[in-house]
Amino acid sequence: MSGQGGFYSPLDQANEGFPMMSKRFTDREGQMFPMRISRVLAFGGMIAACLWAWVPAASAGSPSAVEDKAVFGPIESIRYDFGSKSMSGYFVEQAGACHVMLMVFETTDPGKSPPPSATRVRLVLLPGQIAGLDSEEGRSLNFSCGEGGTTLLVDAGERDRLVNLHALRGTATQ
């Protein structure tokens, strides 16, 4: 097949092969796969956008006392940055209590100066007991031993909020 004026263009070649290609790329209903894929992707994108818009609105109902909560199991790595400090550690269950081992160190740029020495902190918490670490910049971590010493709950956030939360939990257990 030749194009206008007797010239044969690559576009003409593509048009000749199109009916054959369309048969290979259609499903039983005659709908082309690329069209179906684009519709599925558009639908998925719409769902994702709706969820993205809904989640902040749903979580904005009541302000949380902490910004970050996590539950750790025995010998699971625990790592947090709070203010100018960093903390890394783990805990083990012994005799129904949480034996927590932490290394607390100053966060520094390794290229500028050697890091100052770290401090090792050892805690033994009975189920329901809470211990806290505070930074000078107003950030804190609370560690709570779970039932039977099998879990450790870590709350990270502003010092004032965590101290108030600690006080509330303390009065609730008395």
Image (tube, grey):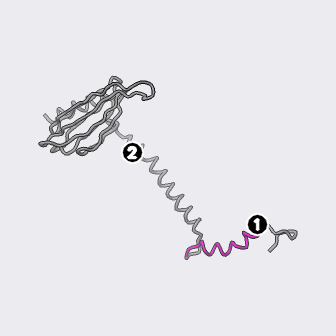
**How many numbered callouts?**
2
Compare marks 2 and 1 and give the one earlier in the sequence: 1
Residue at (23, 30) in percent of width and height: 121
**Quadrant of the rendering where the C terminus is positioned:** top left
Classify mark 2: residues with Cα within 10 Å, few (<14), some (14-19) or many (20+): few
Answer left or right for 28 relative to 149.
right
Front one among 126 and 48: 126
Q: Residue furthest right?
A: 5
Q: Which residue is label 2 attached to?
A: 58
Q: Which residue is mark 1?
A: 10
| Residue 3 x %, y % | 82, 69
The question of residue 24 being in magenta is answered with yes
Which quadrant holds residue 151? Answer: top left
Is 81 magenta? The answer is no
**Residue 146 at x, y = what percent?**
19, 42
Q: Amino acid at mark 1?
A: Pro
Dot 1, crowdedness within 10 Å: few (<14), some or many (≥20)? few
Question: Toward the viewer: 95 or 151?
Answer: 95
Is residue 21 placed above or below 126 in the rendered structure? below
* Part of the protein shown in magenta: 11-27
User: Taken as a whole, is the magenta stretch helix, strand or loop?
Assistant: helix
Kind of residue indicated by mark 2: Ala
Picture quadrant where residue 142 is located: top left
Where is the N terminus found, in terms of image quarters?
bottom right
